[in-house]
Amino acid sequence: MKCPGPSCKEVCEFLSDFVDGQMSAVRRLAFEAHLKACPPCAEYMHQFALTIKLSKKCCCPGKPTLPIPDDLIKAVCAAMAADQPACDVSQARCDTTAPLSKQQN
Amino acid sequence: MSRVTAADDFPSRVTANLAPRADEIEAIEPEADFGDGALVLQLKARDGKAYERVMRELGPRLLATAVRMLGNEDDAREAVQDAFLSAFRNMQNFDGKSKLSTWLHRIVINACLMKLRTKRRKPSVSIETLLPRYNDEGHMELPIQSWRRGETGNDDDAPDDSLRQRVREEIETLPEEYRAVLMLRDVEDLDTAETAVVLGVSESAVKTRLHRARQALRAKLDLVVRGERSQEGGK
Ligand SMILES: [Zn+2]
């Protein structure tokens, strides 16, 4: 089998650059010519691209279902209240219209 | 059944494969744009109501990221709690150049990586056997067998539960340095530079590891496909 342009090895070693769009136009054309003429590389490319897609699809199945537990929210708010400094004049902005935090109540 | 061969509709099929669909974007983008100034000012002013709103509205997605990274809900909740505390304490560092949700996502990833460093001491195994091998002429040594339609899900359908489970299990078995890069780049959508920063490695190391991780995962999925074919008993 004689494939044009880069070798099968080169194609497979640089497929990530190819699918991630990090390849010069000239090199990309050479890769495309090779993939069109070389069924094994074309199949490898297909499986490689599908693998990338499957990682995303299988790890991120739509909307997350786990809510943030109330005790986590309470713990964070309590910790923030506990270490809150007084309104720090050294800070660039201190929004006096925002309600001051609870722990000062 | 004949599958459309790769050469037929190349490269449009490749582009179609990689472009995220609406529901995939949905999985990473929050509904509301939290980058708006008023909320950020409230957070910077240490407003408890603003903390609660951010945790309730952005928290579930961040928790989902942490579960993906850490593999269990208890560790994930701890990481998210650490991340929120760290973020709220360092709100002055939020410059508004990115969305608040993006900033928090990076902080959660950092919190997860810190947990992984202390917990996961999996010995690193070689993935050499999963990488393609070539003969002297530069051709692949082993023939590539086609994945038939349906064996890895149809391109446009959501994968079924069993495929999802298998893919996640195979990602889990990758050596940690490869798994981390694959998760950050291909699942959490960090770019190469961001991944290099959070992992403390060079960008070229990220690129090399990502490519090998993808190749190794492809080979693992190929074994799954072939294993299932042989179980079908030459159907
Ligand atoms: Zn080839």
Image (spheres, rainbow, N blue to C red):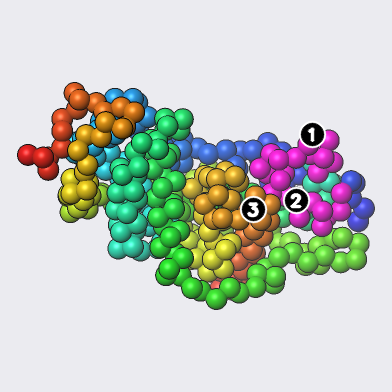
Between residues B149 and A24, which one lies in front from this camera angle? A24
Magenta region's main secondary structure?
helix
Measure the C-alpha gap from mark 3 to mark 2. 18 Å
Q: Which residue is mark 1?
A: A25
A90 sits left or right of B161 in the view: left
Rendered residue at 18%/49% (across/down): A82
- Which amino acid, by three-letter code, is at mark 3? Ser
Query: Residue A73, percent across and down?
Result: 21, 48
Q: Residues within 10 Å of mark 1 (few under 14, many from 20)?
A: few
The residue that label 3 is drawn on is: B202
Front residue of B77 and A37: B77
Residue that numbered label 2 is attached to? A14
**Residues shaded magenta:** A6-31
**Cα gap from disc 1 to disc 2, whole angstroms:** 14 Å
Q: In the picture, residue A25 is in which quadrant?
A: top right
* SS at circle 3: loop
Q: Can residue B23 be spotted in the picture?
A: no
Amino acid, disc 1: Ala
Residue B112 image point, x, y percent: 41, 57
Residue type (three-letter) at the residue carrying disc 2 = Phe
B169 to B65, vertically: above or below = below
- Report helix, strand or loop for mark 2: loop
